[in-house]
Image: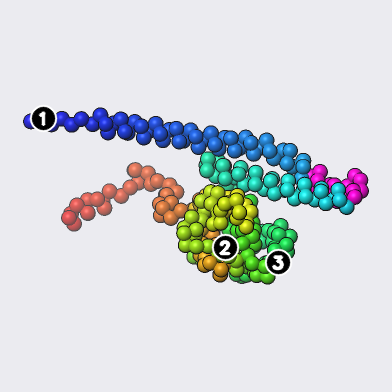
């Protein structure tokens, strides 16, 4: 008996799926190359705009009138904002393309807290937000990429400040949780709905979207944080309640991603015993016992 089945349609569908997958990968690769190329092309003139406008605002070279100094300040502020957006796009494209390489080394995470607070302090003062920190004593060294961890902390704190109410507090806590470092940023801001909370970390996602949204931004801050945490093989969690604030927690492995459980269970001998010196009586005794 012989059975025949026509699978032409199924094979055609498989071929279409393979082709669609190939086209999607090419489109993603083209997008990443475009963002990387345009980002580098935009950063060079933006650095000049930001640098020279800062010189003008500080009256280096010549004294400006109050009106011109105000204009130079607006140019500097807008250029700096645009430069930050370009840098976030570059980082996002590198993370998506798998080209963001971590340079891990042991360091104290608490040492980057004050520099980060200094960078976001003007933003906090403009919004009347107070920054506080609670750091556990005797925290161990963290084996991670210091620049990436600095960016994680900056993005979390600046995002918390942006969505905080005037007169509220943004607190940063660091403590050990098992074999991980627990970094939590807590704000007393507008909060998020459960639907929005489930989409935290998606690129370009904003809880309040649309042209009339009250908060500016690209929606890349938390997605970059999630990408950097994932590269460290850590975990990103978020809890929120409308009108009561948001808590975002990043768990980073203390020993880094280089030390894994499956690798530490393998025992590698330092030397192998020569065959001539092995005791073969054990095998004979084992046979007798059986």
Colour setup of the view:
rainbow
Region in magenta: 51-65
Q: In the depicted view, which residue is nearer to us: 119 or 203?
A: 203
Residue position for label 1? 2
Q: In the depicted view, which residue is nearer to us: 56 or 96?
A: 56
* Residue placed furthest toward the left: 1
| Precedes in sequence: disc 2 or disc 1 | 1
**Numbered circle sitting on residue 183:** 2
Q: Image check: 17 left or right of 248?
A: left
- What residue lies at 39% left-to-right and 31% top-to-bottom? 19
The Cα atoms of the two marked residues, 2 and 1, are separated by 65 Å
* Residue placed furthest toward the front: 212
| Precedes in sequence: disc 1 or disc 3 | 1
Q: Is residue 63 magenta?
A: yes
Residue 218 image point, x, y percent: 60, 49
Secondary element under disc 1, as helix, strand or loop, is loop
Q: Residues within 10 Å of mark 3 (few under 14, many from 20)?
A: some
Secondary element under disc 2, as helix, strand or loop, is strand
The Cα atoms of the two marked residues, 1 and 3, are separated by 81 Å
Q: Is residue 59 magenta?
A: yes
Residue 108 in view of the camera:
no
Q: Residues within 10 Å of mark 2 (few under 14, many from 20)?
A: many
Residue 6 image point, x, y percent: 20, 30
């Amino acid at each position: 008996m012989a059975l025949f089945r026509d699978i032409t349609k199924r094979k055609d569908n498989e071929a279409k799926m393979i082709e669609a997958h190939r086209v999607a990968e090419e489109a993603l690769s083209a997008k990443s190359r475009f963002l990387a190329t345009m980002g580098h092309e935009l950063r060079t003139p933006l650095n000049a705009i930001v640098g020279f406008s800062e010189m003008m605002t500080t009256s280096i070279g010549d004294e400006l009138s109050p009106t011109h100094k105000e204009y130079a300040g607006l140019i500097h502020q807008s250029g700096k904002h645009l430069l930050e957006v370009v840098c976030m796009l570059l980082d996002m494209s590198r993370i998506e393309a798998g080209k963001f390489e971590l340079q891990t080394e042991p360091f104290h995470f608490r040492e980057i807290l004050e520099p980060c607070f200094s960078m976001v302090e003007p933003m906090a003062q403009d919004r009347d937000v107070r920054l506080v920190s609670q750091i556990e004593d005797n925290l161990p060294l963290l084996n991670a990429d210091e620049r990436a961890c600095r960016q994680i902390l900056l993005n979390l704190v600046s995002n918390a400040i942006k969505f905080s109410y005037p007169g509220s507090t943004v607190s940063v806590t660091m403590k050990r949780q098992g074999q991980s470092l627990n970094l939590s940023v807590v704000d007393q801001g507008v909060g998020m709905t459960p639907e929005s909370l489930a989409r935290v970390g998606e690129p370009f996602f904003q809880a309040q979207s649309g042209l009339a949204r009250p908060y500016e931004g690209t929606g890349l801050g938390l997605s970059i944080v999630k990408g950097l945490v994932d590269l460290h093989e850590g975990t990103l969690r978020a809890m929120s309640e409308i009108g009561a604030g948001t808590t975002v927690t990043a768990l980073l492995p203390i020993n880094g991603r280089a030390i894994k459980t499956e690798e530490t269970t393998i025992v590698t001998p330092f030397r192998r015993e020569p065959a001539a010196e092995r005791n073969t009586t054990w095998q004979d005794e084992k046979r007798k016992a059986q």
